[in-house]
Image (cartoon, grey):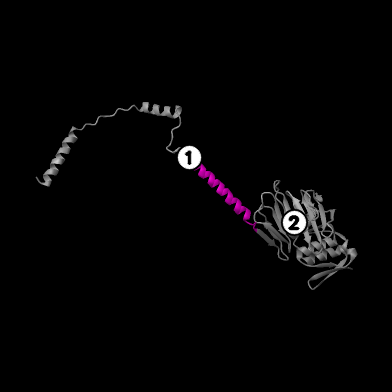
Amino acid sequence: MNKNDIDNKDYKSSFDWQGRIYFRPVSTDADAVYAKIWHKLRYENSIPVGISPVWKYVSVAASLVLLIVSTILVSVYTKNEPLSYLEVSAVPGTKVKVVLPDSSTVWLNSNAMIRYPQQFSENIRSVEFMGEALFQVRHDEKRPFVVNAEDLKIKVLGTSFNVFSSKEKGIVETTLLDGSIALFSSQNHTAVADIVLSPNQQALYNKKNGHIDVLNVCASSYASWTNGNFIFEKNTLQEIASSLERAFNVKIHIQDEELLKERLTARFTHQETLDEILSVLQISAQYKYKKEKGEIYITKR
């Protein structure tokens, strides 16, 4: 018998068996099966999903270890990472608007400088400042805003005020537009302020002796420089000259004691030049002025 005969015989045998096999239909009650499953889900205990209790404890332990390690790493890197500071200055004869990390705004006058962290801390908003600037501080009761103007510390929650710090004159001039601000001298290491200003008050801090004088002023006249306007209301000629010096980056000498105390009222709201302002003011103040080597000298007529 050859191989082909054997294969044909096996094929025929398997075919005969196929004819003898019968599949019996399975009868299923779908409603009964559904009811049984629903009963187990509703009334019996929860069904395990195949996770060993040992692995449950291992996963919990691993999670705790990961949490501890992450906390340590965050603490170490946060503690060791130094604060990144930004410094902005206004070049002579210009004004610069600065938006701080908390959305407070600062207008820097000519030659002014401000230094502040790239991101304020959770407890305090602190900046270092020198020159003249108008601060418009966003209100935040949880984080007081502190301006370190050389030897004077100005603390606020949210308000608008003008600050002028001059090394040459040894005076820090703080003028409040609205809200309230607290002033702390360099000798004051307590939580109680030396002076608390109200709107339209101005504090003159003497850096040599730490004394603070408070004056009643028209605060808006000290902040009008931000939009190029100059509003003087019964200001002394000395105060006006100081404002013009900062705005136009020029030195003005008043060579008469009587002129220093002369009070003037004037408004310049059309971007007038320095010569135009001085020419108008001299009509009321009865002075004359001249320029020498880039500086201005004012004398009585």
Q: Is residue 31 magenta?
A: no
Element under label 1? helix
In percent of width and height, residue 276 lies at 79, 65
Q: x, y (%) of residue 261?
A: 88, 61
Q: Is residue 227 visible?
A: no
Residue found 54% across the figure and 44% down from its top: 64
Quadrant for residue 252, please give it: bottom right
Quadrant of image for the N terminus: top left
Q: Nearer the viewer, residue 158 or 71?
A: 71
113 or 245, which lies in front?
113
Q: Is residue 15 left or right of residue 235?
A: left
Dot 1 alpha-carbon crowd within 10 angstroms: few under 14, some 14 to 19, many 20 or more:
few
Q: Which residue is mark 1?
A: 56
In three-dimensional space, the C-alpha distance between marks 1 and 2, rounded to whole angstroms, equals 56 Å
Q: 66 or 134: nearer the eye?
A: 66
Residue 91, by quadrant, is bottom right
Element type at mark 2: strand
Going by the numbered disc 1, the residue's amino acid type is Lys
> Tag 2 or tag 1, which sits nearer the N-term?
1
Range of residues picked out in magenta: 57-84
Q: Main secondary structure of the magenta part?
A: helix
Going by the image, does 97 lie left or right of 48?
A: right
- Can you give x and y, in whole percent of width and height, for residue 206 in the image? 83, 58
The amino acid type, in three-letter code, at marker 2 is Asn
- Residue assigned mark 2: 148
Q: Is residue 278 visible?
A: yes
- In the displayed structure, would residue 10 be above or below residue 154? above
Disc marking residue 33: none
Depth-wise, is mark 1 or mark 2 nearer the camera?
1
